[in-house]
Image (tube, rainbow, N blue to C red):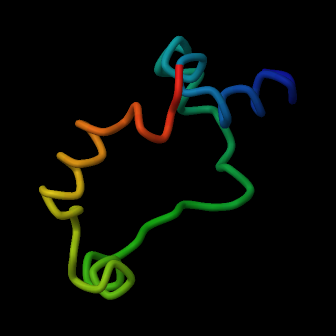
Amino acid sequence: MNRVDIVRAWKDPLYRASLTADERDRLPGHPSGLMEIEDELLKSVAAGALTTALKCTESSFNNFRSCCPK
């Protein structure tokens, strides 16, 4: 696999999914490495709130035209 295809496989999930299992196994690791975030760290960043308030979501959905004119 040439460099262009390798970089494309790293960046494009649809292209990566189109590769055979053997081709995916032969891909070198991404230079930035594997990104894993522990749940506790994620909760501390989100201040314990993993979702937005329902009222805010409803308001944003129902009033989307107020900030996005035609």
Left or right, 64 with respect to 15, comes to left
Q: Which residue is situated farthest in the right direction here? A: 3
Left or right, 56 with respect to 37, comes to left
**Residue 46 in which image quadrant:** bottom left
Q: Residue 57, relative to residue 10: is it above or below?
A: below
Q: Residue 25, relative to residue 23: is it above or below?
A: below
Q: Residue at x 86, y 25 (%)?
A: 4
Q: Nearer the viewer, residue 20 or 4?
A: 4
Q: Residue 45, relative to residue 31: is it above or below?
A: below
Q: Position of residue 21 (x, y in %)?
A: 46, 20
Q: Residue at x 34, y 77 (%)?
A: 42
Q: Position of residue 32 (x, y in %)?
A: 70, 60
Q: Position of residue 24 (x, y in %)?
A: 55, 28
Q: Position of residue 47 (x, y in %)?
A: 29, 86
Left or right, 39 with respect to 37, comes to left
Q: Nearer the viewer, residue 59 or 66?
A: 66
Q: Residue at x 63, y 27 (%)?
A: 12
User: Could you tell me which quadrant the N terminus lies in?
Assistant: top right
Q: Which residue is situated farthest in the left direction here? A: 54
